[in-house]
Amino acid sequence: MRVWASVPLAVSALQTNKLRTGLTALGVIIGVAAVVTMMAIGAGAQARVADQIRSLGANLIIVLSGSITSGGVRLGSGSQLTITEDDARAIQREVSSVQVAASTMRGGAQVIFGDANWSTGLQGVTPEFFQAREWDAGSGRLLMPEDVDGAAKVVVVGQTVVEHLFAGSDPLGQTIWIKKVPFAVVGTLARKGQSTQGDDQDDTIIIPLSTAKQKVLGVSQANARAVNSILIKVGETGRMKEAQGQIHDLLRQRHHLQPNADDDFALRNLSEILASQEATSHVLSLLLASVAAVSLVVGGIGIMNIMFVSVTERTREIGVRRAVGAHRRDILNQFLVEAVVVSLAGGLIGIAVGVIGSYVIGYVFQWSILVSVTGILPAFLFAGAIGIFFGYYPAPKASRLKPIEALRYE
């Protein structure tokens, strides 16, 4: 008798004791549901981290001011502005893989509009900033080159500032005050969401770099061209390492650093950070799934125990089947198929429970959940493998029973 012919017999045998079959499958159901849920939570966390990093901009390298040594004392990172607007222009001009390099200055400001006020982050930038960050306008326009050239008192505001400062009114054309300086709102930014550090990227206002230096943040006494950071967008992902090396060498050359001298700047490759974060999230997902898979193994042990009991209870049935011509292979197939059917049925129900449970957890705890075939299929296949593995030992025991002894069994 072929394996497929054993399926109806296995299903019929399982239906004769539905309560025991259900309890047997319960361990598999819980195990598969746990694996599916843990995989969905892990994949959701991984996707959220990736989205947060990509929201900073694709193929992005950030140059930050480094540490300096003064009087034999090494000061902390950013203790003095060591990079300049000229560095940004040189990088864009001399590194072929670089698309844009944007100089930026950062600070904080209390913004006033009418009777409302809001404390937010302020960024002085050049127009290349928006291309580097891949940040579009939500309404109105972004900053233009002539705004920087003329130190115009114009501002582009983030969505969080819009919500807290303008209370539902249209911000375009309105005048806000920053450190007693009036600024005209010419645009709003598209929503970005949180960064990987949990900062609200939309809680910001952006003004021309020249305006920030002259009217709001001030300039470095050591170098009026100095900036906090340079955002660099590289054209191709495959050239990030090459571009990073060229930028490093160019800045050391421009800053006249001796071969044995430390860098007075720092480079941050966001592609490397993304890869590291994704790898960490992937390991976490596998760890969660492995812990959940333990319950599947426990469910498999339950299947094996029940199958042993079933062999004992159905000894006379086995003897009758052997007496009328059934081969040992037919008996083995039937009991093995019963174990697999219980596992797969439990796996299907467990998948449904796991998917529903994942969305319920995501809704209740406001977590990112990502249910995918790659999270469901391994759990289902593992459930089938559990049935074969733990059902194989009882099945040969049943097939080895001698017909005469089985018929005499009470």
Image: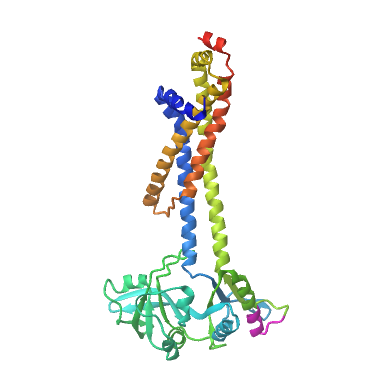
- Direction top: furthest residue: 408
The answer, for residue 207, to whether it is visible in the render is yes
- Give the total number of marks visible in the rendering: 0
Tell me where residue 391 appears, x and y as whole percent. Answer: 54, 28
- Name the outermost residue toward the left: 169
- As drawn, which residue projects farthest toward the bottom? 150
**Structure colour scheme:** rainbow
In the rendered image, the vertical position of residue 265 relative to residue 182, given as above or below: above
Q: Main secondary structure of the magenta part?
A: helix
* Front-lying residue, 88 or 196: 88
Residue 176: name its quadrant. bottom left
Q: Position of residue 184 (x, y in %)?
A: 34, 84
Taking the image as drawn, is residue 295 in sight?
no
Q: Which region of the structure is painted magenta? A: 249-258
Point 45% across, 46% down: residue: 37
Q: Is residue 120 above or below residue 388?
A: below
Q: Is residue 265 left or right of residue 182?
A: right
Q: Point out residue 385 in the picture as x, y percentages from the top left corner.
A: 54, 36
Q: Residue at x 56, y 86 (%)?
A: 86
Could you tell me residue 27's position as x and y percent?
A: 47, 33
* Point 59% across, 73% down: residue: 267
Above or below, comparing residue 333 to residue 243 in the picture:
above
Q: Is residue 236 magenta?
A: no
Q: Viewer-proximal residue, 404 or 387?
A: 404
Left or right of 19: which side holds 296?
Answer: right
The residue lying toward the viewer, choosing from 3 and 379, is 3
